[in-house]
Amino acid sequence: MESKNLCQPHFIFIPLMAPGHILPMVDMAKLLSRRNVKVTIVTTPLNSIPFQDTIDREIQNGSPIQIQLFQFPNDEAGIPKGCESVDTLPSRDLMPNFPIALDMLHKPLEELCEKLEPFPSCIICDKHIPCVAEIANKLKVPRIIFDGTSCFHLLCAHNLHASKVHEGVSSEEKFIIPGLPHRIELQKSQLPGLFNPNSNQNVNAFREKIRACEENSYGIVVNSFEELELEYVKEFQRVTGRRVWCVGPVSLSNKGILDKAQRGKRENNTNDENHYMKWLDSWPISSVIYVCLGSLSNATPEQLIEIGLGLEATKRPFIWVIRGAYKRDEIETWLVEYGFEDRVKGRGLLIKGWAPQVLILSHKSIGTFLTHCGWNSTLEGICAGVPLVTYPLFAEQFFNEKVVVQVLESGVSLGAENGVHLGEEEKSRVQVKRENVRDAIEKVMGEGEEQERIREVARKWAHMAKKAIEEGGSSYNNMSQLIEDIIHIE
Ligand SMILES: *[C@@H]1O[C@H](CO)[C@@H](O)[C@H](O)[C@H]1NC(C)=O
Ligand SMILES: *[C@@H]1O[C@H](CO)[C@@H](O)[C@H](O)[C@H]1NC(C)=O
Ligand SMILES: *[C@H]1O[C@H](CO)[C@@H](O)[C@H](O)[C@H]1NC(C)=O
């Protein structure tokens, strides 16, 4: 054990280049640096822009945190210049080039890490960048995985891999995930692509590599808190023997208005958040529906139209964030031809592009959040204390829906039956009808005992989340433990 580590541990954060992955890692890095631990976030120039300001504010407040940049291997990986993240790829056909680019990070990352001062005590890395394993081994630095999902999902994935129950069933057949505290039923078409071997062998090989690197890491940090899913945290630790630190919900690190407003913002010229806040001010408490299907949303135009018609049918005020790149122009055309914005004039606010989600959700007039159940959005909704209406699309989102609806009992499902894998949107049918949208929203916003109960439960979780991250809370303590563990590592 070198004594220099004892004085000043230095944590290196290496996030995956995708907004849903970068944001929680930046939040986690901020939390850690506020504990007076030196932190360096390593990323590429374009990916650093959205969080540069928040890190500058952190530094002004005395946190020992910095950003170090390396060049994205655009030319080598055949990805156009100006594009350094999954969500900005000009075409889905370029998706397979992304893992290639990630493999090429080996050299620039290793060179950068070697030169850092003080020498790194620990690398916390997104699990999708497996080349970091070799770097950490070579530098003899403990490597901790950031997975970006919940312990619930981690345990489900582990039990599926171990039992292979999903292999014997057909695509739309339901089966129970073994070894869980709750009876969780899914169908194979809802599982992440990971559980359906890909036609592309490179993709399969890459996934295998990720799994192997996960297994031999020093441990795993999770954006969750123990109270939220205690049985799942314990069981995951038990079956895998891994160290797990639950240090979330990390989005609660954004306390100031500026941090909330700018979180994940890419442009620096708009000031729309004032407009949104004023608009929200004009509505009664808990009356507005907030709808956002994520930054990589791949819902088809037919599906988005049903959502829009469902929102219209609720007769309630709403904010609808439309982002997804998939056939975006078709939905734009529909909006115009149907006259959607006129029909919902005064009570429907469309945000076409990025939205200050944490800021919006923190407004007291928000009454529910219709979400795609990406884990960071799910947690942000939980922290906002509003019931969720769930519409999972792909990746581990169907697991997150189960967390909300069955484990926390703070949400209602829209009833989507099949996942829509990225790149396979063509094949997908409409999953959710306008009536489903209207009815589900009534179940969380309408009058009645059930409705009151679900709102009460949602408030309870938000309260627990805030306590977890405060001094003395479980996530605060887990972060202390993480620091201790790294300082005292043999
Ligand atoms: C964004 O604008 C603010 C104030 O106008 C400025 O201080 C800051 O440097 C800008 N940030 C970026 C990343 O351009
Ligand atoms: C995380 O915090 C909880 C509650 O304070 C504690 O029981 C648990 O042991 C901690 N986990 C680690 C890895 O420190
Ligand atoms: C959370 O991640 C999703 C993508 O999964 C992204 O759309 C969203 O913007 C993130 N949250 C915030 C507050 O930026």
Image (cartoon, rainbow, N blue to C red):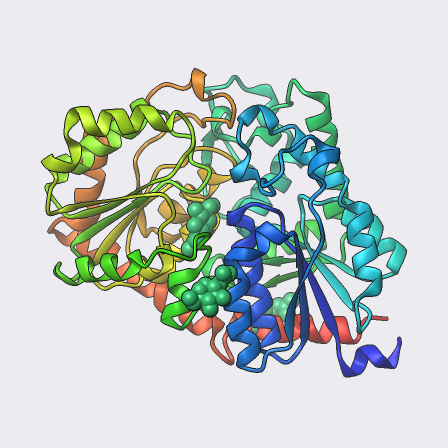
Residue 432 visible: no
The spot of residue 68 in percent (x, y) is: 69, 62
Is 125 rendered above or below residue 60?
Answer: above
Seen in the image, is 480 located left or right of residue 274? right
Seen from the viewer's position, the closer of residues 81 and 289 is: 81
Q: Residue at x 35, y 37 (%)?
A: 391
Seen in the image, is 303 located left or right of residue 310? right
Residue 119 visible: yes
**Residue 65 falls in which quadrant of the image?**
bottom right
Seen in the image, is 429 located left or right of residue 156? left
The spot of residue 139 in percent (x, y) is: 87, 59
Is 236 rendered above or below residue 475?
Answer: above
Q: Quadrant of the C terminus?
A: bottom right
Q: Quadrant of the N terminus?
A: bottom right
The spot of residue 96 in percent (x, y) is: 65, 28
Seen from the viewer's position, the closer of residues 467 and 345 is: 345
Q: Residue at x 18, y 24 (%)?
A: 337
